């Protein structure tokens, strides 16, 4: 999980969450050896943490196969968290559908201050560029990616300029306001955003906004990443595909509960 360098990370807490995210990625039971190797941790450290998570009811261990797997306590913990009419399962299914429809790595993200933060990731094999293997929790500068352009599109131009100046100071890197505003303006016109090599050489992304917001009222954005030449050549096709997926997603969600519909 990537965090801003100014924020300290509690190692045991981070590792516990990384184990849960690992199971989300592989979607099957795993042995101690598999988990330790995947995380590049000493087996002794992984063993202690897994035993603790079992004692707390978050994992189970099969005594015959020696495999670990999450328990039903996890979905019950987050069952109350929704993005308006959409629950976590529906959102994860949407991301998987985007990955399948495009053949590219797909991400659902939300706004986290000066960053875009990944919530769900469905990775595909990288073609034409070196993937940084993003995962849930990964952060990208909001002013330097298509997902960020889509989030900023609802802001005033004055507010976007302020965010850009602040981000440049915090990140200690140049942010072209002209490039940013051009990307935001295109997103407003077409209903999708795209960029190539603005943040990372050889890499770009295409993004659309969901109609649903996260529990804090922040926009949710669906995006796919690819080699920059693929994005330049196919951004319109990819944008239209994502827009269709999001439109179908919203149309098939269950009605809002009476209390939510009245708000």
Image (cartoon, grey):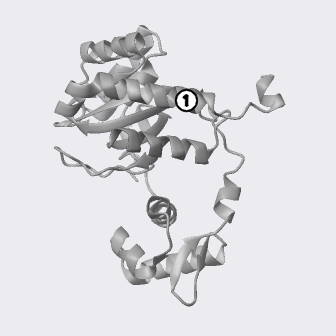
91 with respect to 105 (left or right): right
Residue that numbered label 1 is attached to: 248
Q: Quadrant of the C terminus?
A: top right
Residue at point 38%, 16% (across, down)? 187
**Viewer-proximal residue among 8 and 133:** 133
Residue at point 59%, 34% (across, down)? 214
230 with respect to 1 (left or right): left
Q: Position of residue 61 (x, y in %)?
A: 58, 81
The image quadrant that residue 147 belongs to is: top left
Q: Is residue 161 visible?
A: no
Residue at point 44%, 59% (across, down)? 25
Q: Position of residue 125 (x, y in %)?
A: 27, 52
Farthest residue, direction bottom: 64
Q: Position of residue 192 (x, y in %)?
A: 39, 21
**Viewer-proximal residue among 253 and 76:** 253
In what element is the residue under mark 1?
helix
The image quadrant that residue 139 belongs to is: top left
Q: Is residue 32 visible?
A: yes
Q: Is residue 232 above or below residue 21?
A: above
Residue at point 39%, 10% (across, down)? 189
**Viewer-proximal residue among 121 and 155:** 121
Q: Is residue 257 above or below residue 179?
A: below
Residues packed near mark 1 inside 10 Å, few (<14), some (14 to 19) or many (20 plus): few
**Viewer-proximal residue among 177 and 66:** 66
Q: Is residue 116 above or below residue 8?
A: above
Q: Position of residue 225 (x, y in %)?
A: 31, 38
The image quadrant that residue 201 belongs to is: top left
Q: How many marks?
A: 1
């Amino acid at each position: 999980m990537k965090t801003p360098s100014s924020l300290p990370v509690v190692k045991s807490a981070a590792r516990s969450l990384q184990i849960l995210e690992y199971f989300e990625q592989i979607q099957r039971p795993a042995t101690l050896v598999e988990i330790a190797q995947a995380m590049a941790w000493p087996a002794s450290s992984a063993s202690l943490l897994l035993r603790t998570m079992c004692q707390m009811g978050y994992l189970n261990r099969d005594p015959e196969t020696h495999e670990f797997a999450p328990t039903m306590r996890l979905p019950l913990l987050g069952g109350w968290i929704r993005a308006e009419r959409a629950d976590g399962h529906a959102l994860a299914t949407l991301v998987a559908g985007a990955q399948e429809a495009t053949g590219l790595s797909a991400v659902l993200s939300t706004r986290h201050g000066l960053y875009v933060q990944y919530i769900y990731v469905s990775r595909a094999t990288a073609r034409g560029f070196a993937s940084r293997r993003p995962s849930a929790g990964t952060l990208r500068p909001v002013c330097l990616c298509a997902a960020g352009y889509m989030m900023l599109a609802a802001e005033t131009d004055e507010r976007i300029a302020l965010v850009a100046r602040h981000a440049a100071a915090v990140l200690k890197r140049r942010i072209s306001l002209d490039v940013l505003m051009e990307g935001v303006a295109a997103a407003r016109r077409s209903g999708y955003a795209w960029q190539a090599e603005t943040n990372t050489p050889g890499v770009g992304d295409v993004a659309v906004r969901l109609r649903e917001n996260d529990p804090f009222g922040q926009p949710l954005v669906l995006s796919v990443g690819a080699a920059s030449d693929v994005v330049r050549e196919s951004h319109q096709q990819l944008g239209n595909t994502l827009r269709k997926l999001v439109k179908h997603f919203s149309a098939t969600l269950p009605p809002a509960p009476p209390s939510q519909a009245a708000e």
